[in-house]
Image (spheres, helix red, strand yellow):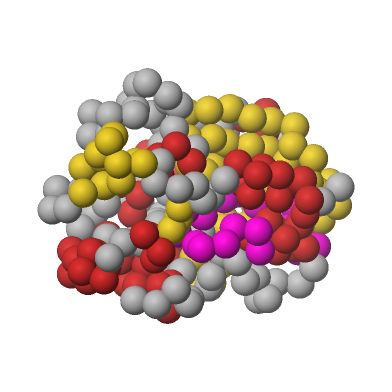
């Protein structure tokens, strides 16, 4: 597996497989969730656990919302049921199929488009009022083009909500075959599976259906949003307790930001 964009094809196939395996982030919302959203009762997450504050959204009725790398039949259908005009953009056709399934089941209007989160040429400048981008840029090698494209397709005053990993999640190596975190083996940040894993480990990832991941610095995650033309006016960390990772419960491993396009 080379360091070029061919890794995206691998990650695309992996997320298609995750749909078949019913990974948590591929499970579409229930009819009850949609019914509640139509009544104004809804919440969504950018990070694994903590709901996004409702005041971050304002009134989304009639707003053009881009769910960026956010397929899976979860956030997009909720926004559509709440009255937004929703486009879901994702690399995985199977994940997009989950949004299409919910839209058909619930009589919702949702546009689905397949593509790379760092390349939004399918959209004209100033196309959206809100971009909702949950934890997913850990699957691209360079996050800076994501923020630049978000700034381009958002209208002036538009809102970018983003969730991403604290880079400490990539500070320690995961060892095969269990892929458990080894707190004695420290890795460099920024981190790349493509540069760190051996050829044998990459082949094991391919066989076992692991997506290739990248640990971005906070300069790239936050500083590059500002450089792209955003002012950050909201921030929180998500504790996300999970016994599978020794860091969880000791440090908040996920971050969410709200940024205004200036």
- Examine the rendering and report whether any part of residue 28 can be seen: yes
Please give the name of the residue rendered at 31% of the width and 51% of the height, measured from the top-left corner.
Answer: 27
Q: Quadrant of the N terminus?
A: bottom left
Residue 155 position in % (x across, y down): 81, 56
Q: Which portion, as a residue range, is magenta? A: 126-145
Please give the name of the residue rendered at 51% of the width and 55% of the height, measured from the top-left corner.
Answer: 137
Residue 149 position in % (x across, y down): 70, 63
- Quarter of the rendering containing residue 192: bottom left
- Examine the rendering and report whether any part of residue 47 can be seen: no
Residue 214 position in % (x across, y down): 45, 55
- Nearest the camera: 191 or 19? 191
- Nearest the camera: 44 or 226? 226
Please give the name of the residue rendered at 54% of the width and 35% of the height, measured from the top-left corner.
Answer: 255
- Quarter of the rendering containing residue 15: bottom left
Q: How many marks do you count on the picture? A: 0
Please give the name of the residue rendered at 59% of the width and 58% of the height, measured from the top-left corner.
Answer: 143
- Quarter of the rendering containing residue 96: bottom left
Above/below status of 128 relative to 125 = above
145 horizontally vs 28: left or right? right
Q: Which residue lies most toward the left here?
A: 177
Residue 135 within the segment the image draws in magenta: yes
Residue 205 within the segment the image draws in magenta: no
Q: Which residue lies most toward the top here?
A: 250
Above/below status of 151 relative to 81 = below
238 horizontally vs 256: left or right? left
Residue 159 position in % (x across, y down): 73, 45
């Amino acid at each position: 597996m080379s360091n070029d964009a061919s890794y995206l094809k691998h990650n695309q196939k992996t997320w298609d497989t995750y749909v078949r395996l019913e990974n948590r982030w591929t499970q579409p919302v229930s009819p009850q969730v949609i019914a509640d959203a139509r009544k104004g009762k809804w919440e969504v997450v950018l990070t694994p656990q903590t709901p996004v504050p409702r005041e971050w959204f304002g009134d989304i009725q009639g707003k053009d919302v881009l769910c960026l790398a956010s397929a899976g039949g979860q956030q997009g259908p909720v926004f559509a049921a709440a009255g937004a005009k929703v486009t879901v953009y994702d690399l995985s056709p199977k994940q997009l199929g989950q949004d299409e399934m919910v839209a058909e089941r619930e009589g919702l209007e949702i546009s689905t488009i397949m593509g790379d989160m760092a390349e939004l040429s399918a959209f004209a400048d100033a196309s959206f009022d809100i971009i909702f981008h949950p934890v997913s840029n850990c699957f691209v090698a360079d996050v800076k083009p994501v923020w630049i494209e978000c700034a381009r397709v958002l209208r002036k005053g538009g809102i970018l909500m983003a969730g991403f990993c604290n880079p400490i999640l990539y500070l320690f190596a995961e060892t095969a075959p269990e892929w458990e975190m080894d707190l004695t083996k420290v890795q460099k940040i920024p981190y790349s599976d493509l540069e760190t894993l051996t050829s044998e480990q990459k082949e094991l990832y391919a066989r076992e259906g692991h997506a290739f991941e990248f640990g971005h610095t906070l300069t790239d995650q936050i500083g590059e949003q500002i450089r792209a033309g955003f002012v950050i006016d909201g921030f929180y960390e998500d504790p996300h307790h999970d016994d599978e990772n020794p860091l969880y419960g000791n440090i908040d491993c996920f971050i969410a930001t709200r940024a205004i396009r200036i």
